[in-house]
Structure formats: structure tokens, C-alpha cells
Image (cartoon, rainbow, N blue to C red):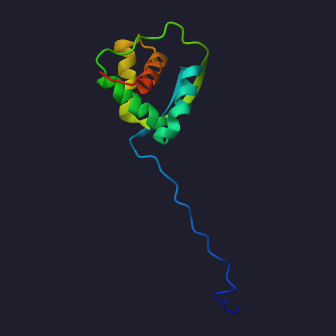
Amino acid sequence: MKALKPWERPKSRKKKKSKKPSPSDVSKRYSLPLSVVEEIKKVAPDYRSQGRVLQVATELLVRMDPLPAPDPEPGEKTRMTYRIPQRTANIIEELAKSSYNNDRSQVFSACVKAIKAKKIN
């Protein structure tokens, strides 16, 4: 068989580089109030992703002196999965246990309040 000329060969396709999550990222599924999910989606373009919104919000919560009060009525809940750094997942668990009666959805409500806050003490 005769060798193909360069113009007769099929074009090689460049492989797309996929963004791989860092080894410290984890995917976590949470039950959240629908209003919190909508707020996270609304502010996500400013932070590049929903996971980044949660990362920034939890870091703000850790630094707030009086934590936001828990919501009395969380409303309708939905399940969401977020890819977040392990540190963020640990902070959410720690805040839920220490300040929000083991209710992670309250931590996410507080995260939304922290993101919306104009002045952080």
C-alpha cells in the first residue's frame, strides 16, 4: 500500500483539555431551601461558579462576629450537589454542629445572608 500524502491524510483533531477538579475538591449533596438555591444561582456569575459562592460565603461566616440568626421557616426544600473544597465542606459541618442545631440548610441560609451583607463586622 502506498503512503498517503499530507493533504490526503485525515486531519488530526486536537484533544480538548478538560478542567479536572483538584484533589482537595469534593462533591457534596445537600437539602436546601429553594429560595437559597435560587439566590446562589443568581450571584454565581459574579464568583464564576456556585461552588465558589459557597466557598466565599463560608469564609465570610467564619469571620463574622455575631453569626446570622437561623431562619424560623426554611420553606420548600430541594437537593443540590456542589463541588466544593474539602475545607468548605468541613466548615459547613462545623457551623451546623456548633451554631445551627445540626441543620446544614440553616448554614446555607446564613451563607446567603453573608453574601448579601453590605458591611461585615
Report x, y in % for residue 15: 56, 65
Q: From the viewer's perspective, is residue 68 above or below residue 26?
A: above
Using the image as rendered, state which of residue 55 and residue 6 is in the foreground.
Answer: 55
Q: From the viewer's perspective, is residue 13 above or below residue 61?
A: below
In the displayed orientation, state which residue is furthest to the bottom. Answer: 2
Is residue 36 rendered to the left or right of residue 5? left
Q: Quadrant of residue 116?
A: top left
Residue at horizontal 54 percent and vertical 26 percent from the top: 39
Residue at horizontal 36 percent and vertical 13 percent from the top: 99
Q: From the viewer's perspective, is residue 13 above or below residue 3?
A: above
Is residue 77 rendered to the left or right of residue 67? right
In the displayed orientation, state which residue is furthest to the top. Answer: 72
Q: How many marks?
A: 0
Looking at the rendering, in which quadrant would you find the N terminus? bottom right
Using the image as rendered, state which of residue 46 and residue 78 is in the foreground.
Answer: 46
Looking at the rendering, in which quadrant would you find the C terminus? top left
Residue at horizontal 66 percent and vertical 91 percent from the top: 3
Report x, y in % for residue 19: 49, 52
Report x, y in % for residue 96: 40, 17
Report x, y in % for residue 68: 39, 15
Residue at horizontal 57 percent and vertical 68 percent from the top: 14
Is residue 14 rendered to the left or right of residue 100? right
Q: Quadrant of residue 66?
A: top left
